[in-house]
Image: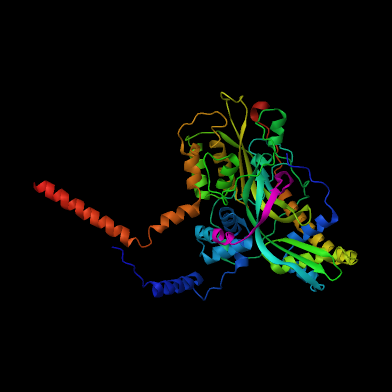
């Protein structure tokens, strides 16, 4: 069976949100980048995505996905890492800066103005798809058959 | 004697310019954008991602545009691009039981918990051309209904409870990777699944169809077919913990196959498995049939000599880039090879004529 997911930490949650969000949306919510030093320049790469045989058995290689990563350090020493889906280097750098800022006193403010907005938008998108899928659920009914009378 | 020849450069440059003009087509028609391809030719994008073996819808859409809609050429472009990317790591195995499903059906259990959810399917359409699409219309709107719980259990779990179906057990061995080491036969099931999921849809479809027609029959039912998104998680060394690095759409198919038992296994249902990038249900179903057919040895079944049971035949011919590379290279200049052939045929003819005269 797949290993149970332990409750994610706050940092795991925000890094996941930043990985999945659209680059232009993040840029719109956080247009200015705080002063920082780039520790590892943004790099586009591939991650091999694995599945499991029969959904639960041995791992196998399904195929790769594009991922971009970047690491930065703020002037106050906070180090941030960005790992984002796709090939947008600006996205990875912005995610790294936000990851670093979330370790500072600015965290509550950024949580409200950036992350909570992204989380709400993602949830709304998921909810919309789930509702459309639910509308296609089959409601079986049984016809009365002649010989049963 | 080998004579080197040069002189095609101008012709090649001009051929590429001609290709570019043809790609654009009639300039009085608006140019197709990559965004339009990604959003409106999504199933073509999915196929290029699956066979290109790289999940990136923007790149797949670009490849389709560049390849003028030739999907194998587009797959070729993606395969070439992915070789330039450094490998940042491997994900944890995705958990498809946590899939946010837009489609989930079972052909074996009508009342499966979680229900039969049809999703955006071509099934039950009449396959009549819709001439309304010739005109630009308003954006269609899907109906809505209260959403069901996010995670839907796998249907195989229900058969597991009665011990009627073979069990897969989890382990965390590192799977072989045919993009890193040449494929070795006999292949493990993990290696076979990697080769099939990136294999040509048409080839996998025909192999699967051949098993249904009797060449290595496996009596497959679609136990479950599901399409939806799953998060992808990876351990990040510099962090010391795993994070989600994105979300992908996949199609998963599990077949339930009749199995009368063998020398080594009791009568029970056996399973075939298909997992493919994107909404690719024909491929996922075909993959699970071919997976099951290739499992004859481990289940102690007879080899009937069917092509779909022949691991080497299936795995070495499934890749359309290898296939098209070898096939299409014969159109490139073979002047010297052919000159040798010509010499040999002339020689043989001369001999045969002389012998006939004697």
- Magenta stretch: residue A146 in it? no
The stretch drawn in magenta includes residue B97:
yes
Confirm whether residue B328 shows in the render: yes
Give whichever of B54, A72 is nearer the camera.
A72
Residue B196 rendering spot, x and y as whole percentages: 55, 46
Number of numbered discs visible in the structure rendering = 0
Quarter of the image that includes the N terminus of chain B: bottom left
Q: Is residue B286 left or right of residue B226?
A: left
Q: Is residue A109 above or below residue B103?
A: below
Seen at 54% across and 37% down, the residue is B294
Q: Nearer the viewer, residue B156 or B10?
A: B10
Image location (x, y in percent) of residue A111: 86, 63
Q: Is residue A58 left or right of residue B308?
A: right
**Rendered image coloring scheme:** rainbow
Q: Residue at x 53, y 29 (%)?
A: B301
**Residue A98 figure quarter:** bottom right
- Comparing B65 with A11, the one in front is A11
**Residue B345, position as x, y percentages in the image:** 23, 53
What residue span does the magenta drawing correspond to? B78-100
């Amino acid at each position: 069976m797949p290993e149970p997911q332990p409750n994610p930490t706050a940092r795991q949650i925000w890094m996941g949100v930043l990985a999945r969000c659209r680059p232009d949306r993040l840029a719109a919510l956080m247009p200015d980048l705080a002063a920082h030093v780039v520790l590892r320049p943004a790099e586009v790469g591939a991650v091999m995505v694995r599945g499991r045989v029969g959904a639960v058995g041995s791992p196998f290689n399904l195929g790769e996905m594009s991922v971009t990563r970047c690491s930065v350090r703020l002037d106050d020493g906070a180090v941030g890492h960005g790992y984002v889906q796709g090939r947008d280097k600006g996205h990875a750098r912005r995610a790294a800066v936000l990851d670093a800022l979330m370790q500072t006193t600015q965290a509550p403010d950024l949580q409200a103005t950036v992350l909570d907005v992204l989380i709400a938008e993602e949830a709304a998108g998921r909810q919309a798809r789930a509702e459309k899928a639910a509308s296609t659920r089959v409601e079986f009914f049984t016809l009365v058959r002649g010989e049963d009378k | 004697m080998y004579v080197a020849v040069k002189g095609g450069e101008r012709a090649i440059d001009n051929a590429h310019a001609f290709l570019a003009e043809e790609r654009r087509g009639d300039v009085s028609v608006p140019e197709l954008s990559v965004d339009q391809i990604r959003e409106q030719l999504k199933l073509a994008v999915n196929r290029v991602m699956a066979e290109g073996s790289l999940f990136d819808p923007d790149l797949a859409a670009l490849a389709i545009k560049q390849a003028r809609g030739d999907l194998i050429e587009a797959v070729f472009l993606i395969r070439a691009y992915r070789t330039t990317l450094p490998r940042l790591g491997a994900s944890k195995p995705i958990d498809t039981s946590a899939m946010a499903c837009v489609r989930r059906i079972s052909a074996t259990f009508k009342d499966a918990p979680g229900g039969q959810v049809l999703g955006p399917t071509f099934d039950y359409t009449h396959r009549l051309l819709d001439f309304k699409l010739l005109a630009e219309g308003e954006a269609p709107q899907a109906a809505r209904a209260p959403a069901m719980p996010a995670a839907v259990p796998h249907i195989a779990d229900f058969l597991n409870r009665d011990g009627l179906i073979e069990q897969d057990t989890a382990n965390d061995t590192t799977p072989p990777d045919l993009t890193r080491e040449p494929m070795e036969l006999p292949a493990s099931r993990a290696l076979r699944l990697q080769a099939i999921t990136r294999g040509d849809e048409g080839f996998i479809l025909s192999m699967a169809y051949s098993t249904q027609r009797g060449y290595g029959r496996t009596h497959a039912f679609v136990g479950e077919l599901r399409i939806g998104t799953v998060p992808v998680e990876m351990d990040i060394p510099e962090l010391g913990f795993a994070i989600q690095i994105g979300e992908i759409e996949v199609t998963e198919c599990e077949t339930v196959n009749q199995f009368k038992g063998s020398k080594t296994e009791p009568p029970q249902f056996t399973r075939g498995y298909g997992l493919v990038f994107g909404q690719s249900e024909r491929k996922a179903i075909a993959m699970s049939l071919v997976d099951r057919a290739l499992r004859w040895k481990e289940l102690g079944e007879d080899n009937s000599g069917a092509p779909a049971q022949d691991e080497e035949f299936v795995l070495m011919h499934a890749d359309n880039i290898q296939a098209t590379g070898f096939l299409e290279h014969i159109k490139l200049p073979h002047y010297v090879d052919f000159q040798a052939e010509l010499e040999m045929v002339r020689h043989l003819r001369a001999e045969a004529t002389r012998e006939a005269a004697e």
